[in-house]
Image (cartoon, helix red, strand yellow):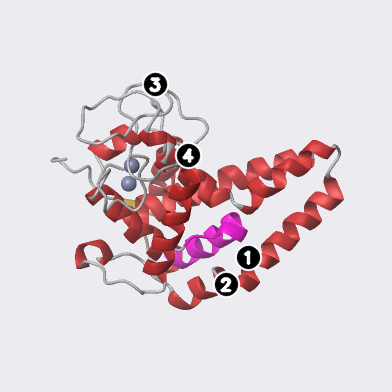
Amino acid sequence: MLVVLFVIVLWYGGLFFQSFFLHRYAAHQVFTMSKTMERITFVLTWIFQGSSYLSAYGYGIMHRMHHAYTDTDQDPHSPSHDPNLFAMMWRTKTIYQDINKERIAIDQRFTKNVPQWKSFDAFASSRFSRLLWIGLYILFFALFVTAWWQWLLLPIAFLMAPIHGVIINWFGHIYGYVNFKMKNTSKNLFRFDFLMMGEGYHNNHHKHANRANFGVKWYEIDITYLIIRLLDAVGLIHLKPIPVKN
Ligand SMILES: [Zn+2]
Ligand SMILES: [Zn+2]
């Protein structure tokens, strides 16, 4: 069962840094932190996302474009424009790499204050780093697998970050309920989001993109937000005041 536990740790660890660092900090900047804390978070994101590490720069810019162009043909990922889930994943990957390698011109509003640590990102996104993590995952599985079906979890470990992305970007724009009628297809996937740590309240988030707390109703408990509140209380990060408008 150690393998199952390992994948659960990767699931929630990788998801936390995607939600906390890449989404709420890099893209939306709902809190601030010192340069040292930011660097520590970069490294922790690399450790927990491992083979599927995403850079704050590439993610942050692409995600701001998603908010600006939701469901239009300029949206980097949308079930309204991509024929299927895999086609969307592939297009997202291409746009992400174009941004990261600075191959396309990007409007200033998308790049403003997005954290970037070029040398570390180059290392953490390198083939060497990805293969190193893949090797370590295989080794862990080889040592601790106790039933054949547990091997089925290995590809999930390899592709954790894109899997998290696709759950929100595909399913979160098709299935679920809405609290806010909007001109886009965003939905809240779960009434209590234990699986995606608050990211699943995607309709709420499209409505109030600058709010740290993605929950609106009493039962929409946002686990990442609770951790953000804790980190704010102990002084590791500083939550910005809740915006009056938006
Ligand atoms: Zn969305
Ligand atoms: Zn967002």
The percent coordinates of residue 138 (x first, y second) are 77, 56
From the viewer's side, name the closer residue of 235 and 128: 128
Q: Sequence-wise, which precedes: disc 1 or disc 3?
A: 1
> Which picture quadrant has residue 49?
bottom right
The Cα atoms of the two marked residues, 4 and 1, are separated by 22 Å
- Residue placed under numbered mark 4 in the picture: 167
The image position of residue 194, as x and y in percent, is 51, 30
Helix, strand or loop at label 2? It is loop
**Image spot of residue 244 (x, y percent):** 14, 40
Residue 52 magenta? yes
- Tell me the distance, in whole angstroms, between the alpha carbons under discs 1 and 3: 38 Å
Q: Which residue is mark 2?
A: 126
- Mark-to-mark CA distance, 3 and 2: 41 Å
Q: Amino acid at mark 1?
A: Arg
Nearest to the observer: residue 146 or residue 94? 94
Distance, label 4 to label 2, CA atoms, is: 25 Å
Name the residue rendered at 61%, 59% in the picture.
Answer: 50
Identified by mark 2, the residue type is Ser
